[in-house]
Amino acid sequence: MTAQRIVIKVGSHVLTQEGAIAKVRMFALVEFIAQLKAKEYEVILVSSGAVAAGFTQLPLDRSSVANKQALAAIGQPYLLKMYQEKFEIFDLLCSQVLLRADVFDSAEHMNHAKVAIDTLLENNVVPIINENDTVSIEELIFGDNDRLSAHVAHHFDAPFLVILSDINAFYDKDPNKYADAKQRKVVNALLKEELEAEHNPNNEFATGGIVTKLQAADFMMKHGKEMFLASGFDLSDVKSYLLDGVHESGTLFKA
Ligand code: ADP
């Protein structure tokens, strides 16, 4: 059986709790990745959380760009250390790959990065990707890991992207505002209005909101790939889908 390559993106809401790294949820995620790997999946993880992890070590004012860059620099190795400790429990190695948005525009850089990712995966190592916030220039940054993860899936040959969020699916309207919002189980196409709605992240560490997730889904579908949006707080839906092949809940974006 050839391995199926997937990208999993986990948002800062899921990874942080009251300003600190949510260790229990991080452990659950690592355990899930270990289960996927046992099922012959090759997994690339795109993880936010560096700024939040940095803030737990040095509470600088996050409203300045310079401080955020400093916090990312402090938090990134700290975040990786926590991942490393958890992957070790499952006898797995993980690795850090920091990308800049402009890497995707250069065939040469991309080939270089792809060789590294392929080599890591061949050796059963989990690449953990994040945007290199410390060196990214404002105009170059994705600013959110949703679109970054779609580019990662596309360029590193993964047909499937999973976004684990604070929300368990895509709804017909914002479920945090409307009690009668209904889940959409399968989405085949997105409307221009849905892709251009105002960014509305609802936590100070989150910069994505639903719109960037839809943009990621749109990018995947346009490239003949699929995306699954599910809860990162409770992994049961994504587990049913990927481990048991049962679509209980969560949104599948498939053209
Ligand atoms: P993360 O931190 O996981 O990247 P965000 O908080 O940035 O996630 O984005 C998800 C949020 O988007 C949800 O908590 C929800 O309040 C909001 N949202 C707005 N419209 C919708 C919708 N139609 N379906 C689902 N979530 C929506």
Image (cartoon, helix red, strand yellow):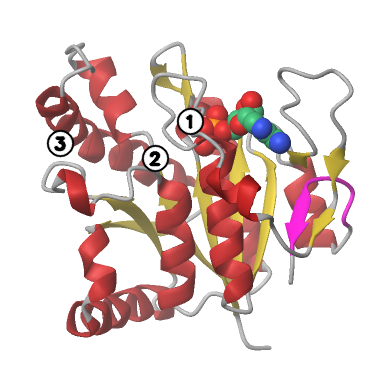
First-in-chain label (2 vs 1):
1
| Identity of the residue drawn at 40% across and 19% down | 204
Q: Position of residue 69 (x, y in %)?
A: 15, 33
Spatial distance from mark 1 to mark 3, Cα to Cα?
17 Å
Does the rendering let one see residue 159? no
Which of the two residues, 206 or 234, is positioned nearer the viewer here? 206
**What residue is pinned by disc 3?**
73
Does the rendering let one see residue 118? yes
Numbered label attached to residue 48:
2
Spatial distance from mark 2 to mark 1, Cα to Cα?
8 Å
Q: Position of residue 68 (x, y in %)?
A: 19, 27
Amino acid type at circle 1 is Leu
Asked if the magenta segment contains residue 249, the reply would be: yes
**Disc 2 vs disc 1: Cβ atoms closer than 8 Å?**
yes
Query: Which quarter of the figure is the N terminus placed in?
Result: bottom right
Q: Position of residue 141 (x, y in %)?
A: 26, 49
Magenta stretch bounds: 247-253
| Identity of the residue drawn at 39% across and 76% down | 123
Q: Secondary structure at mark 1?
A: helix
First-in-chain label (1 vs 3):
1
Amino acid type at circle 3 is Ala
Instruction: Give left or right: position of 151 versus 192.
Output: left
Mark 2 CB within 8 Å of ligand 1:
yes
Q: Secondary structure at mark 3?
A: helix
Q: Secondary structure at mark 2?
A: loop
User: Is residue 218 depicted above or below 182 in this figure?
Assistant: below
Amino acid type at circle 2 is Ser
Asked if the magenta segment contains residue 189, the reply would be: no
**What residue is pinned by disc 1?**
15
